Image: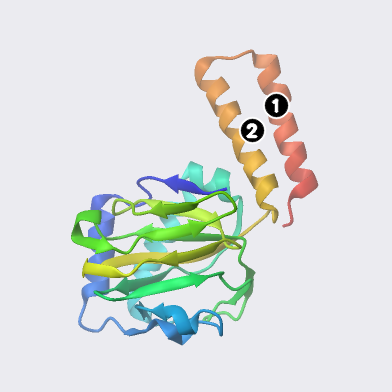
Amino acid sequence: MMLTIPGVLNAEQVGAVRAMLAAEDAPWVDGRATAGWQGAPVKHNQQVAENAAQIAPAQAMILAALETNPTFISAALPHKVYPPMFNRYGVGMGFGAHVDGSVRIDPRTGARLRTDLSATLFLSDPADYDGGELQVIDTFATHAVKLAAGDMVLYPASSLHQVTAVTHGARIASFFWIESMVRADDQRALAYDLDCAIQRLNETGGDAAARTTLVGCYHNLLRMWAET
């Protein structure tokens, strides 16, 4: 399941994160520093060093926003969230087709995280750069994503994806991974659809007994599927 989540950060929050990334002491490094053998040959961007103390407030801001975002919670069913990272694509930079690594190790704690979902949180206005589209490639199509600053896209980390070359301006974003309580993408998608239907019935005053039954089905499915 691929899902766009609007307004994860508001304009003030985006501005605050951008200011931290623009600071003179922001430790931008070659993006290949964290690339695996598959990604390194096709990765051409910059990113902030993973364990840089300067970006801790920005990471905390994003994590706090995710914790209170009902769409993210419903769609991701998060068990662990990798500390948000930040990248920048200038003119001529891009990231060729690749699949994200299956396991990440938190550089601060050493904890391992299974990457069930990938997330890109856009921090640049689309009018500020040309190119730089995230393209997620599945069996049926190539899905191009270029969102407003503060909006986020969530998609299976198993997906083949790429970032097209930037031809003007600069694309700045945060990216990270989520280990879900529900490992399988098809099960997460069913749980999300069921949760959305229940919320819709709540809003429209649907039959109360039917809603109770559906809520029970939702939680019983999670009992079957969830790993905690």
Q: Say whether residue 189 is visible.
A: yes
Label 1, on which residue? 214
Is the residue 1 above or below the residue 183 in the image?
above
Label 2, on which residue? 194
Q: What amino acid type should be assigned to the residue bearing mark 2?
A: Leu
Crowding at label 1, few (<14), some or many (≥20) Cα neighbours within 10 Å? some
Image-based side of 148 in relation to 95, left or right: left
Describe the colour scheme in one phrase: rainbow
User: Where does the image place residue 153, in percent across and percent down from the top left?
Assistant: 44, 53
Image-based side of 65 in relation to 73, left or right: left
Residue located 33% across and 52% down the image: 147
- Which of the 4 image quadrants contains residue 190? top right
Is the residue 116 above or below the residue 21 in the image?
above
Q: Residue furthest right?
A: 224
Is the residue 117 above or below the residue 108 in the image?
above
Please tell me the numbered disc located at residue 31: none
User: Where does the image place residue 219, in percent across and percent down from the top left?
Assistant: 72, 37
Residue located 66% across and 21% down the image: 211
Q: What amino acid type should be assigned to the residue bearing mark 1?
A: Leu
Do tag 2 and tag 1 residues touch (Cβ < 8 Å)? Answer: yes
Residue located 32% across and 70% down the image: 165
Instruction: Give the mark nearer the N terminus: 2 vs 1.
Output: 2
- Mark 2 vs mark 1: give the one in front: 2
Q: Nearer the viewer, residue 216 or 114?
A: 114
